[in-house]
Image (cartoon, rainbow, N blue to C red):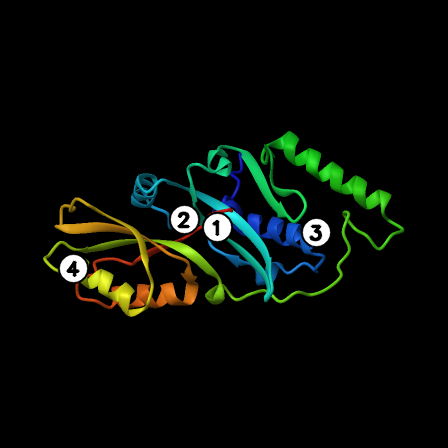
Amino acid sequence: MLKEDPTFDIEGIDAAHKLSILAAIAFGTELQFNQVYTKGISGITTEDIIHAQELGYTIKHLGIAKRTGNGIELRVHPTLVSNKQLIAQVDGVMNAVMVKSNALGTSLYYGAGAGDEATASAVIADLNDIINNQTSNHILGWKSQQKLAVIDNDEIHSEFFLRLLVSDIKGVLAKVTGIFNDHNVSIEALIQKQVDENKNAHIAITTDKVSTKAIMSIKAAIEASDFNQSEVQIIHIELLD
């Protein structure tokens, strides 16, 4: 029996395809799959999950499309969402789509996203739409109208979660917070876990809203320090408000 390759799911490629279609429908723009920032879940560790839970979050692999005054955001990546959010409870083969609109506000659509019957149902529905609209300029219920600029990931503003592994020596925490201060980034919450077998400390930090570019500068500064022991993990936080 042939085994299915999970790469498209684990690395977010399948979600990026779906997001580009949903964004085209929502914003009346052309498909821009090649512009979707895509990051998978293969880099998520047990430590990330534990620290996120202690801070009141669940890690979900989200596809996010937002329209702003500067264009649209198109991104797929692991994301921390509050445990109080309904989308944090979506597990297993279930999928959810959260939509925020001017008139309706926020709504959530929930259902099976995997399995033979669920997939077959979606394919048949798409074929039916194509057949019924074969003499029209509209395909699958939407028509490409404009090409909206996709905002570069470095310019996207978000709250962030950072996980560090540092030497457990006096003054390290002050040095870490000093780096954030040097970059004018506020720390929202900070927890430090017990040392590991190599006498290193695990630190988890959440920030105020800041650009991806700024948080990557902080990551580089920490990784260049003499107290750092591993690559700094960075995960977006979405408030979904």
* Residue type, label 3: Ile
Q: Residue placed farthest to the left in the image?
A: 170
Q: Nearer the viewer, residue 78 or 120?
A: 78
Looking at the image, is mark 2 or mark 4 earlier in the sequence? 2
Residue placed at 18% from the left, 50% from the top?
201
Q: CA distance from mark 2 to mark 1?
A: 7 Å
Do labels 4 and 1 touch, CB within 8 Å? Answer: no
Q: CA distance from mark 1 to mark 3?
A: 24 Å
Q: Mark 1 highlights which residue?
A: 11
Q: Which disc number belongs to residue 42?
A: 2
Looking at the image, is mark 2 or mark 1 earlier in the sequence? 1
* Residue type, label 2: Ser
Query: In this rendering, would 148 be left or right of 199?
Result: right
The answer to whether one can see residue 223 in this image is no
Q: Mark 3 highlights which residue?
A: 25
In the rendered image, the vertical position of residue 128 relative to residue 75, given as above or below:
above
Please identify, in this view, whether the residue under mark 4 or under mark 1 is nearer the observer. Answer: 4
Query: In this rendering, would 13 be left or right of 140?
Result: left
Q: Residue placed farthest to the front in the image?
A: 103
Q: Residues within 10 Å of mark 1 (few under 14, many from 20)?
A: many
Q: CA distance from mark 3 to mark 2?
A: 29 Å
Please identify, in this view, whether the residue under mark 2 or under mark 4 is nearer the observer. Answer: 4
Do labels 2 and 1 touch, CB within 8 Å? Answer: yes
From the top left corner, tell me how far across and down residue 3 is, in percent: 51, 38
Please identify, in this view, whether the residue under mark 3 or under mark 2 is nearer the observer. Answer: 3
From the top left corner, tell me how far across and down residue 20 is, in percent: 63, 54
Q: Mark 4 highlights which residue?
A: 172
